Amino acid sequence: CAWYSGGFSPKDGEKLLAPLIEAVQDAGLKDAAIFHFPDAYGLTGEGRDPWASYVDVLIEEIDKIAGSRRPLILFGHSRGAAPATCVAYRQPERVRKVYIAACGAMQLGEATGWELLSHSFKQGGDRELLKWFSSLQPENILLHRTAHETSDAEFEEQVQSSKFLS
């Protein structure tokens, strides 16, 4: 079972993890699968409350593929670490190993890095969100210009007229 990093569509996340799944299957492990984030399963809401329902859905999806007793190996990349560790916590008798890549450790009772990012985006609005995405894609000149070099009026016009940003 594998989860990709946040910020990817299900299709792009699957493409990102395809080499991993292929290697796992080549090694002889059956029923390797990629799972998605809550919105891909029609779940909505913010914060911690809807998360338990999401983990329930993940376990149901895993059981459809692997049955309810087969041992599991889990992999989470970045934001994918959260669902991987939550499934492991809920299914300790089944999970043999959890691999986490590119994600800092979660601390009990403290906001995760993703929660902190979410709060900063809500406070800073669309422009701060685009500045962050621009920092991840420095070669994207259009994104950089939109996030950093437009007036507020130009920025709002571009957001409203874009099929990707509105």
Image (spheres, rainbow, N blue to C red):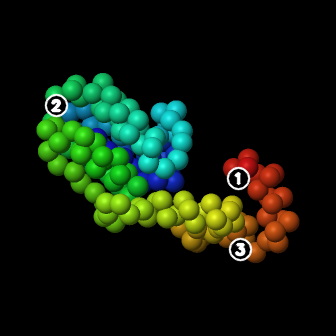
- Amino acid type assigned to the residue bearing label 2 in the image: Arg
Position of residue 166 relative to residue 70, above or below, is: below
Counting residues from the N terminus, which is met first, the one under dot 2 or under dot 3?
2
The residue to which callout 2 is attached is 70
Q: Position of residue 52 (x, y in %)?
A: 38, 40
Secondary structure beneath dot 1 equals loop
Locate the N terminus and report the quarter of the image it occupies. Answer: top left
- Image height of 164 relative to 138, above or below: above
Q: Does residue 10 appear anywhere in the picture?
A: yes
Question: Left or right of 38: which side holds 87?
Answer: left
The answer to whether mark 1 and mark 3 are in CB contact below 8 A is no
Q: Which mark is residue 95?
A: none
| Alpha carbon distance from label 2 to label 3 | 50 Å
Q: Residues within 10 Å of mark 1 (few under 14, many from 20)?
A: few
Element carrying mark 3: helix
Q: Please report the residue visible at 52 percent of the width from the left and 33 percent of the height from the top.
A: 42
In percent of the image, x 76 and y 56: which residue is there? 159
Q: Which of the marked residues, 2 or 1, is nearer the chain's N terminus?
A: 2
Which residue is tagged 1?
165
Pick whichever of labels 1 and 3 is earlier in the sequence. 3
Residue assigned mark 3: 148
Name the spot of residue 86 as percent of width and height, x first.
30, 46
Residue at image position (17%, 42%) is 92
Name the residue type under label 3: His
